[in-house]
Image: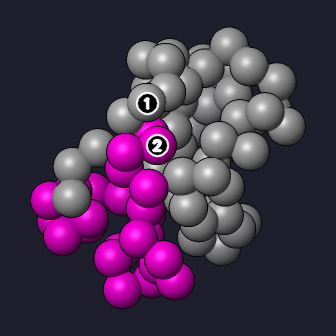
């Protein structure tokens, strides 16, 4: 996950929208499938449920990874 992606608005949120910086070291430590799910979700290409399915983990576990990575929650209007 590139810091540059935030600057180029690749994700559905911008750097100015974050209360805390994303925990990139934590994300980098995760298995590839979970990183893929997080990345697709951050790009707004899939819902959190679909991202969990891609990651191969239950939604609750995926959401815990999202929270630990400090990735904001995407609401219905985002």
Tag 1 residue = 29
> Which quadrant: the C terminus?
bottom right
Answer above or below: position of 51 versus 76. Answer: above
Q: Nearer the viewer, residue 64 or 14?
A: 64
Answer above or below: position of 37 versus 43. Answer: above
Q: Is residue 76 left or right of residue 31?
A: right
Answer above or below: position of 36 versus 5. Answer: above
Residue 35 can be seen in this image: yes
Q: Tell me if label 2 and label 1 are in contact, CB under 8 Å.
A: yes
Residue 44 pos. (x, y %): 49, 50
- Asked if the stretch drawn in magenta spans residue 26, the answer is yes
The residue segment tinted magenta is: 4-27
Residue 12 pos. (x, y %): 43, 63
Residue 69 pos. (x, y %): 54, 52
- For disc 2, the neighbor class at 10 Å (few under 14, some 14 to 19, many from 20) is few
Q: Residue 8's quadrant in the figure?
A: bottom left
Asked which secondary structure carries label 1, the reply is helix
Tag 2 residue = 26
Answer above or below: position of 24 versus 30. Answer: below
Residue 62 pos. (x, y %): 71, 35
Which residue is found at the position 21% from the left and 49% from the top?
2
Q: Residue 73's quadrant in the figure?
A: bottom right
């Amino acid at each position: 996950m590139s810091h540059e992606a935030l600057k180029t608005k690749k994700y559905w949120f911008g750097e100015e929208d974050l209360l805390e910086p994303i925990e990139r070291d934590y994300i980098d430590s995760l298995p590839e499938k979970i990183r893929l799910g997080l990345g697709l979700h951050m790009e707004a290409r899939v819902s959190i449920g679909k991202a969990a399915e891609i990651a191969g983990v239950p939604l609750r576990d995926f959401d815990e990874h999202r929270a630990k990575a400090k990735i904001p929650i995407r609401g219905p209007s985002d």
